[in-house]
Amino acid sequence: QVQLVESGGGLVKPGESLTLSCAASGFTFSDYYMGWVRQAPGSGLDWASYISGSGTATFHADSVKGRFTISRDNAKNSLFLQMNSLRAEDSAVYYCARWNGGFDYWGQGTLVTVSS
Amino acid sequence: EIVLTQSPGTLSLSPGETATLSCRASQSISNNYLTWYQQKPGQAPRRLIHGAFNRATGIPDRFSGSVSGTDFTLTIRSLEPEDFAVYYCQQYGNSWTFGQGTKVEMK
């Protein structure tokens, strides 16, 4: 069965960096676009970044462009989100999700808190 | 950027009633590329409908999607207790955007 397991969240200070990871299993990872969707406490959903199956095409929301970098290692069935220059407004649960005409599988999420 | 406006913000209904949720797009969405999700507290979202009206695998047929121009609708017939949740729409016809959500609560 499809499983997505995120890790790497935590408490950081404004301006610091953090890298999130997502371990995928149960499907041919390289066949699918993957994305990171975040949800601030008590708020709605907001996409941050997504990447093509081969990893050659990446897309970032304007709110994170220039600060976040999405990447993947298809040999290790892993997805990453490198987050630099973090701001308080980046605080959220970050979900790793598989794209298939909508996100059809989601991880359980990892919490990122940016606070001094 | 395509803006999605969901209404109402909150819908108060009883089990057995029908819920009608709206998602209005600020411009035409190519190929009606719109997805509906359900999210319960403490859980990740679950995809219900893709391509405006295609039910995802395992989704009960009381959930249905429809579209008229830039107005997308999610209808939930005969609400079950487990259907009380927050519902989001997302368009993927031009980049991606999410609506702000509609909460379906028990009256």
Image: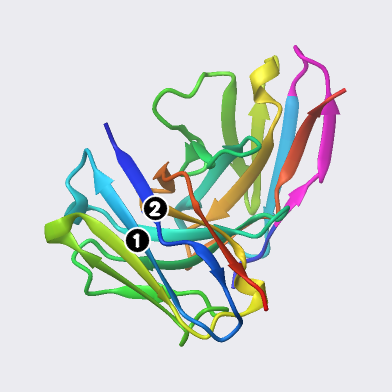
> Which picture quadrant has residue B106?
top right
Three-letter amino acid code at the position of disc 1: Ser
Q: In this rendering, is residue A112 above or below A44?
A: below
Residue A83 or B9: which is nearer the viewer?
A83
Of all chains, the one bearing label 1 is A
Q: Which residue was labeled with disc 2?
A: A6
Give the residues drawn in magenta, as a range. Answer: B5-18
Residue at left offset 41%, top offset 54% = A96
Three-letter amino acid code at the position of disc 2: Glu
Residue at left offset 30%, top offset 58% = A33
Based on the picture, tell me whether residue A66 belongs to the magenta stretch: no
Of all chains, the one bearing label 2 is A
Q: In this rendering, is residue A76 above or below B106?
A: below
Residue B29 visible somewhere in the drawing: no
Neighbor class of circle 1 (other Cα within 10 Å; few <14, some 14-19, many 20+) is many
> Which picture quadrant has residue B28?
bottom right
Q: Are marks 1 and 2 on the same chain?
A: yes
Question: B81 left or right of B32?
Answer: right
User: Residue B16: x percent and y percent?
Assistant: 75, 12
Neighbor class of circle 2 (other Cα within 10 Å; few <14, some 14-19, many 20+) is many
Question: A62 left or right of B27?
Answer: left
* CB under 8 Å between discs 1 and 2: yes
Q: Residue furthest left?
A: A75
Dot 2: element: strand
Color scheme of the displayed model: rainbow
Q: Which residue was labeled with disc 1?
A: A21
